[in-house]
Amino acid sequence: MTRTRTRRRGARLRWVAWAGVAGIAAGAAFLAVAELVALLVAREASPVLAVGAFVIDVVPQPLKEFAISTFGEADKPILLAGLGVAVVVASAAAGVLQLVGPPLGLVALGLAGAASVAATTTRAGASGWSWLPAVAGAVAGVLLLRAAVIRLRTWRDGATATDAAGDDRDPRLDRRGFLALTGIAAASAVVVGLGARLATAASSSIAAIREALRLPGPRSVVDVPAGAELDVPGLSPLITPNADFYRVDTALTVPEVDPSTWRLVVDGMVDRPIELGFDDLVAMGLDEYGVTLTCVSNEVGGDLVGTAIWLGVPVRDILRLAGPRPGADMVLSRSVDGFTASTPLEALTDDDRDAILAVGMNGEPLPLEHGFPVRMVVPGLYGYVSATKWVTRLQVTTFADDEAYWTPRGYSAEAPIKMSSRIDTPKPGRPVPAGPGVIAGVAWAQTVGIERVEVRIDDGEWRTATLSTPINADTWVQWMVDWDAAPGTHYATVRAVDRNGRTQVEERAPIAPDGSTGWQRTLITVT
Ligand SMILES: Nc1nc2c(c(=O)[nH]1)N[C@H]1C(S)=C(S)[C@@H](COP(=O)(O)O)O[C@H]1N2
Ligand SMILES: [Mo]
């Protein structure tokens, strides 16, 4: 008796497990068909990546910051792996639902399709066909799940019927049909796997293309003056090595852009829309520019800031070829992945501001994650309104007519970098020995330049720090003060004054909507 019940429960579990397998096969078919259709008609509309990108877009900025600080560069692979697990579990659940309560499994797949369509079509850079991959995938998934579970049910009914005499169907046929169907779905999943593999291979081939790329030497180099770098252990280097340069973007996978097919379109409110290739750009002549890039998400004391020697061509020279029309006041730069930035036209045409299209960074072609092959760099403007990586289009327009990626997400359409200063050493939580020591860090006020940095220990007098000789007004300076560290705990506070005589804002402001303010105050333990 007990044995029979156990066996029956075991048998029931077996059908549930097969239903789960059918669901996973249907999920795989969904993705396989969607990827295939995406490849053919709408490359940007891969549901997995679109849903991942959607998650990135809807996640609030503080959570993004948390992900970046916790997982670092692995934040995106972790998101993808999490999505993968969720897809498998949800697909299996849809299969079981379809077995025990049809058509709930089909409804679940339909809802997944609708969610994918929402993600792919609202994605920046969505084309007119962006809905198709998810719809085709959902249809394939629904048809497969329906057919598989019908076969599973007849297989089950046949196998469990006590009297099969009245049934002329051979349960083995349904079993075979079920396994064949799920097998085909599994084969489709292999197609997706192969596709992913190919994409990976393509990305490494872009890496190889970048490795092989030889940029012409610069016509002019950045003059790094003597005394530009202070020698203090723990102080940020004057030039941030590429490997240590902060990375911030919304790209789930690093876009793969081949310089030989890269085009830059300059259009919108211009007299002559133009199109340039990579060689055309390089042929305009490359010069070096020292610029400190800053992210609007940089908290006071944060590390989303770095200085590089960029190699590039002034944006004004390119805009001049197209001839911006009167009335235009903004350039909407667009990346291959749909990211956009709104930069005041005037900041790009100003002869006194070195806004560039950069192809090189610290003596190398741009690293892939920093925008290979071409990105914008504009001194004095936060990255999200100026530093478009993998840039392919400059649309001359107006702030009234167009808005960029971050504007509807709570950030200002225009955002000059706010002057700030940072203490690099001593670090909080790292006690220093009593006696003579050094407090040092960096300070920036792009386009204006730092005049003075002042440091206060506890409630003492403000003391003027020694500054490194600046490269130019667009790069940060290093600063240091000697101090005689008395045992105990102390607060060090830093503030900067720019060359216009303005003092760094003391009042604390959050990063949204246009950048943080406040003086960094750090706790130092002296033992
Ligand atoms: N295509 C693209 N470009 C982009 C972004 C992005 O999300 N996508 N983020 C911008 C932001 S917010 C910043 S701060 C800088 C960061 O550049 P980095 O990653 O090279 O340091 O890139 C800008 N360019
Ligand atoms: Mo940023």
Image: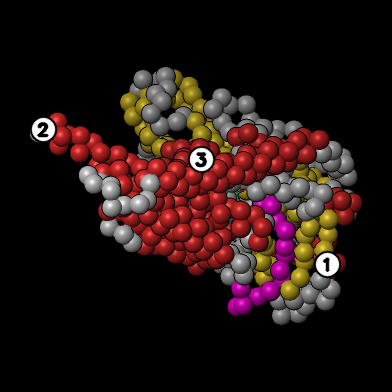
Based on the picture, tell me whether residue 223 belongs to the magenta stretch: no
Name which of mark 1 and mark 3 comes first in the sequence.
3
Whether 263 is drawn above or below 305: the answer is below
Q: Vertically, is 22 above or below 331? A: above
Quadrant housing the N terminus = top left
Category of crowding for the residue at label 3, using alpha-carbon neighbours closer than 10 angstroms: few (below 14), some (14–19), many (at least 20): few
Ligand 1 lies under 8 Å from the Cβ of mark 3: no
Closer to the camera in the image, 46 or 357: 46
Extreme-front residue of the structure: 165
In the image, residue 458 sits, relative to residue 298, either above or below, namely above
Q: Earlier in the sequence, mark 2 or mark 1?
A: 2
Magenta region, residue range: 383-402
| Among numbered discs 2 and 3, the one appearing first in the sequence | 2
Residue lying furthest left: 1
Given this view, does label 2 or label 1 mark the residue nearer the observer? 2
Rendered residue at 28%/48% (across/down): 165
Q: Nearer the viewer, residue 168 or 458?
A: 168
Q: Residues within 10 Å of mark 1 (few under 14, many from 20)?
A: some
Residue for badge 2 = 2
Identity, as a three-letter code, of the amino acid under mark 2: Thr
Label 2, label 3: how far apart the Cα atoms are: 48 Å
Q: Is mark 2 within 8 Å of ligand 1?
A: no
Q: Measured from the top left, where is residue 311 in percent x and y? A: 78, 45
Q: Tell me whether circle 2 and circle 1 mark residues in contact (CB < 8 Å).
A: no
Q: Is residue 389 left or right of residue 31?
A: right
The residue at 28%/47% (across/down) is 164
